[in-house]
Image (cartoon, rainbow, N blue to C red):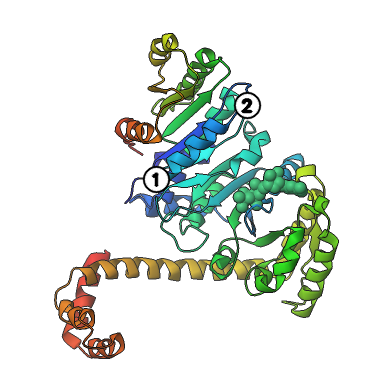
Amino acid sequence: MARFIKVLVAKPGLDGHDRGAKVLTLGLRDEGFEVIYTGLRQSPEKIVQAALQEDVDVVGLSCLSGAHSYLFPKVVGLLKEKKRDDVLVIGGGIIPPEDVPHLQEEGIAGIFGPGSSIGKIAEFIRENVRERAA
Amino acid sequence: MELVEQMLGSDQLALARLITLVEREASETPQIIKSIYPHTGKSYVVGVTGPPGGGKSTLIDRLTAVLRRKGLTVGIVAVDPTSPFSGGAMLGDRIRMQQHYLDSGVFIRSMATRGSQGGLPRTVRGVIKLLDAAGKDIILVETVGVGQTELDIMEAVDTIVVVLVPEAGDTIQTLKAGLMEIGDVFVVNKADRGGAENLVAELEAMLHQNLKQTWWEVPALTAQAANDIGIEELYERIESHHQALQQMGKLDLKRCEQRKKELTNMIGTKITSKFSELINEGGEFTRYLEIVERGELDPYSVWEEIIYDRVLLRTWMRRLEEEIR
Ligand SMILES: Nc1nc2c(ncn2[C@@H]2O[C@H](COP(=O)(O)OP(=O)(O)OP(=O)(O)O)[C@@H](O)[C@H]2O)c(=O)[nH]1
Ligand SMILES: [Mg+2]
């Protein structure tokens, strides 16, 4: 039985640029992941509801608006509330280095800046995604 | 099963997990299907198919809004192809359905075709059963349909909506063999681009020529999913088809055929996959294989020898019997 890894790529926040998220989506597909892209300007509630229904293994958040310090932890919190704290949450976009420790503390497992290669992200996912009981 | 109990109590997390198990063909699958089976058969299942980019997801989104206004709950299964090269997939249908994300009466699930032939994953029937048991009134299944290989959708749904665009007029003759025969309702979407009325007329002429049955005249409608136009009419036609099927006793007949097909397909898939594993193990068969590999004899002649090789056939049968359990 092959192990398929499902990733939800989402863009919380109000900025209207989703080129990065699209590149990530296609890149991860080419790395062999099943990737769901949910589009621009998603509220954390919508992202988590989609993650729940799709039963994803990973949520990749991309944010360029600067609201990541609020939005990313909010997604992690809601996932926990929905009993999905087993989901691996990673983040990308424009994130100042000084914000990284805070985000990691809040449960964002990996932070990938604009220059990150898809290969690196894929590797990180494969190494850190949790084996699922069910 | 505990997960099944939770799902029947309308727990979304449990439903999502069960779908994953069935989709993976996990060892729990027979047990899951067995325990939900008594709760199935109540949903009405509609397939939405057609060439890429025709507006299927947008149409489903708008149709779902109509269904919700009528107080019906909706399950959506959106299928996209798995890349044969990477094994990955981009599941992009959901992006058109954002207005329903927070509605607890709508459950959306994306599926990749994974190892299945054609446009429909073989596990989709199990997923439909789960949504059915979870109490969804209507289940909408989106698949990409381009030709003959995509006709499996017929075996999984009650009504098929084929979505075309005005420009399809040029290729309609090639569509004839595949999509044209499976549609119960045709929609020419993106009617804002012009040419839709012409295509509808062409479709009607063609559908009239090869009338599938006397009890249902396949309609062709125009729509503008993006502008929310023609959706109510589409709903009405789907509902009329449902009524017609029911009044003629065809719905039961159709589902009965589908169950039969499901079982025979399942047997076929299981035996074929076990059998190819067995053959690849080699053994006595290696001798035949080498003859073909070296090009000494053609495959047909070798086939003739194999079917008279009692010893080999018996070994295969015995091994198959052991393996398949
Ligand atoms: N002009 C016009 N565009 C439309 C209409 N309906 C949908 N679209 C657009 O067509 C594009 C494709 O729509 P989708 O709903 O994703 O089409 P689809 O058939 O689901 O596409 P795939 O799943 O990729 O095969 C989007 O950009 C839609 O906004 C319409 O009525 N008119
Ligand atoms: Mg689509």
Which is more N-terminal, label 2 or label 1?
A: 1
As drawn, the residue found furthest toward the front would be: A115
- Residue type at mark 2 is Arg
Check the image and report above or below for B272 versus A121: below
Mark-to-mark CA distance, 1 and 2: 26 Å
Chain letter for mark 1, please: A
Q: Quadrant of the C terminus of chain B?
A: bottom left
Q: Are marks 1 and 2 in contact (CB under 8 Å)?
A: no
Task: Tell me: A44 left or right of B13.
Answer: right
- The residue carrying mark 2 is A41
**Quarter-wise, where is residue A5 in the image?**
top left
Foreground pick, B304 / B322: B304
Residue A22 at x, y = what percent? 54, 36
Foreground pick, A112 / A40: A112
Asked if both marks, 1 and 2, belong to the same chain, the answer given is yes
- The residue carrying mark 1 is A32
Residue at 47% over, 29% down: A60
Question: What is the tally of numbered marks visible in this picture?
Answer: 2
Task: Tell me: B304 left or right of A49.
Answer: left
Residue B141 at x, y = what percent? 60, 53
Task: Tell me: B178 left or right of B307.
Answer: right
Residue A34 at x, y = what percent? 45, 43
Residue at 53% over, 32% down: A21
Residue B121 at x, y = what percent? 48, 57
Task: Tell me: B246 left or right of A103.
Answer: right
Q: Secondary structure at mark 2?
A: loop
**Quarter-wise, where is residue B266 in the image?**
bottom left
Task: Kindly identify which numbered label has been placed on residue B229.
Answer: none
Check the image and report above or below for B212 versus B325: below
- Residue type at mark 1 is Gly
Q: Secondary structure at mark 1?
A: loop
